[in-house]
Image (spheres, rainbow, N blue to C red):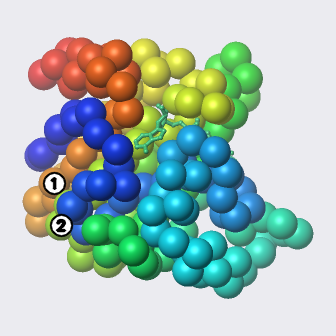
Amino acid sequence: MSIEIVTADITRLDVDAIVNAANTSLLGGGGVDGAIHRAAGPALLEACRGLPQVQPGVRCPTGEARLTPGFNLPARYVIHTVGPVWRGGAHDEASLLASCYQQSMALAIEHAVESIAFPAISCGIYGYPPELAAPLALRNLRVAQEGIAPIRVLVCCFSPSMASIWQAALNDAG
Ligand code: AR6
């Protein structure tokens, strides 16, 4: 098992895949989504546009994941996932966030990814408390790594304060 917490701009990381905290349209937005689209270039938007809509305007329902090439990024792939909006915790937020990590890891394994970086999905604009998101994410990442060839998993935080919350959760998990 290998999980590391780093403080960095995820678009700069030299890994096989980076995960995008997207919205259901997959057509870009603010936060890490905006940064990934800017760094990958316009071909990423075209690739996302080409993904099938499961409902009008929805290319990836909340809790699911989709894979595209990374285009101008150092990463070969972008795995787009849509975290839940935090609405107090009684609206399935935890199981939807768990599903983001599970589905992203399943796609990574399917594509023989050897290293992958996750942002703190839902912990920005979507308002998920990071103290609750971190242990849940790490638990799911650990389970996803059981019984497979080792994958290097990074959680890429954008600020030292976010990284310290994730590092504490990693330390607590032993
Ligand atoms: N590298 C790593 N982490 C980053 C970067 C970066 N370049 N930029 C921001 N973060 P957010 P969400 C951190 O809001 O909460 C978009 O508009 C950020 O500080 O990007 O899942 C989508 O289109 C925070 O800790 O994602 C959706 O509409 C974490 O990434 C919505 O935001 C996630 O924050 C998704 O909201």
Tell me the distance, in whole angstroms, between the alpha carbons under discs 1 and 2: 6 Å
Residue 16 placed where, x, y %? Answer: 25, 68
Counting from the top left corner in percent of width and height, residue 155 is at: 30, 40
* Residue at 30%, 21% in the rendered image: 160
Indicate the secondary structure of the residue bearing disc 1. strand
Mark 1 touches mark 2? (CB < 8 Å) = yes
Residue extending furthest toward the bottom:
50
Q: Which residue is mark 2?
A: 114
The part of the image, by quadrant, that contains residue 55 is bottom right
Residue at far right of view: 56
Q: Which residue is mark 1?
A: 152
Which label is found at residue 59? none
Residue that appears at 74% across and 61% down? 25
Q: Nearer the viewer, residue 33 or 139?
A: 33
Tell me the amino acid under the disc marked 1.
Arg
> Can residue 99 be seen from the camera position used here?
no
Apparent side of residue 2 relative to residue 55 in the rendered image (left or right): left
| Residue 157: image location, x then y, percent | 34, 33
**Horizontal and vertical percent position of residue 31:** 57, 41
Q: Residue at x 71, y 56 (%)?
A: 24
Above or below 88: residue 157 = below
Query: What residue appears at the point 64 percent right and 80 percent down from the top-left corner?
Result: 46
Q: Nearer the viewer, residue 87 or 140?
A: 87
Q: Secondary structure at mark 2?
A: loop
